[in-house]
Amino acid sequence: VGGRRAIGIDIGGTKIAGLLVDEDGTVHERRERDTPAEDVHATLEQIQAVGAELAKGAAAIGIGAAGMVDFEAGVMRSAPNLAWREVPIRDLVSERLGLPCLLDNDANAAAWGEFRFGAARRYEEAVLVVTVGTGIGGGIIADGALYRGAHGFAAEIGHFIVEPDGPRCGCGNRGCWEQVASGQALDRLGAEAAREDGTILIARMAAGNPVTGRYVADAARQGDATARAIFDRVGRRLGEGIAGLVNVLDPEAVVVGGGVAEEGELILDPARRAFLEAVEAPDHRPDIPILQAALGNDAGAIGAAALALESLG
Ligand SMILES: [Zn+2]
């Protein structure tokens, strides 16, 4: 009953999520721990603990981690939200757990999860996955495999400059796509609107707390015009960026995941409209569906487990 199993681990800035996953993508067990983001050794201890609890019956372990992962070497070169520089995570975890281990970027892992078992499972060749949360990450499926580039760093799609005088980005530039088309943009535009007029619904909902995209989404769902205009603006920027990437990659479909995508049509409807206006020659190419992701927060761990089983198990 059931095929081979692997552990999939998703290391985020705040949580380490571990799943025990079948080769058909079914989740059998799950564990979660806090990420001690400031401390590399403590984080490795937590990964080891999660892995050990799930290790019974597992043939391999796959890890998706936020940051610049050197896939061939199994090394985290640099993680923006963790105190990790040049850490050989793959070999350290493999040694500690006695299992073959694979390390990939978290957005690549999530893209693979959606491609194999989620919203893009019916496609076979070329899919773009855009993960929209606080920032924007991505994964590119080309010729039925993850495209990792020459050094493993491909699909850092949040960081191309679309507004040279725009807000400062964590990468050091100004006006990267993720600054105008992600959760940060919803936070910023919501806070600006509330500062300008303290009587708007967003401001009243926040009731003195820092304004976040959550309040903007709640207000938009109640039909508030200011909140809807913010979603339209951020959604448009998302769709314009997707159009540029589709011009480059020519995928069969685009999957949009991450926390902001869970707002559904609020963000996807303006994104789809802007995409159709901005993509090159929309009347002369097949429809490219822009789909909401299907696996939610589990995509990264499920994808990491699948990658591990397929390449190591
Ligand atoms: Zn940037």
Image (spheres, rainbow, N blue to C red):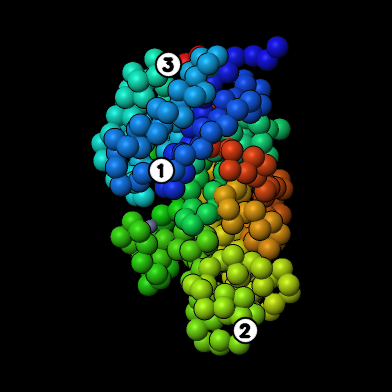
The three-letter amino acid code for the residue at tag 2 is Ile
Pick the front one: 129 or 54: 54
Look at the image and tell me whether residue 40 can be seen: yes
Q: Mark 1 or mark 3: which comes first in sequence?
A: 1
91 left or right of 35? left
Q: Circle 1 sits in a helix, a strand or a loop, which is it?
A: loop
Q: Circle 3 sits in a helix, a strand or a loop, which is it?
A: loop
- The residue depicted at 36 percent of the width and 67 percent of the height is 168
Q: x%, y% of residue 146?
A: 50, 32
Note whether 181 is above or below 23 in the view shown: below
Note whether 231 is above or below 24 in the view shown: below
The three-letter amino acid code for the residue at tag 3 is Leu
Ligand 1 picture quarter: bottom left
Q: Which mark is residue 200?
A: 2
Q: x%, y% of residue 28?
A: 63, 25
Disc 2/disc 1 C-alpha distance (Å): 37 Å
116 left or right of 311? right
Q: x%, y% of residue 2?
A: 68, 15
Q: Which residue is mark 3?
A: 99
Contact? badges 2 and 3 (CB < 8 Å): no
Q: x%, y% of residue 307?
A: 51, 25
* Front disc: 1 or 3: 1
Q: Mark 2 or mark 1: which comes first in sequence?
A: 1
**Quadrant housing residue 224:** bottom right
- The residue depicted at 67 percent of the width and 42 percent of the height is 294
* Front disc: 2 or 1: 1
Q: Which mark is residue 35?
A: 1
Disc 1/disc 3 C-alpha distance (Å): 22 Å
**Quadrant housing residue 57:** top right
On-image quarter of the N terminus: top right
Pick the front one: 117 or 235: 117
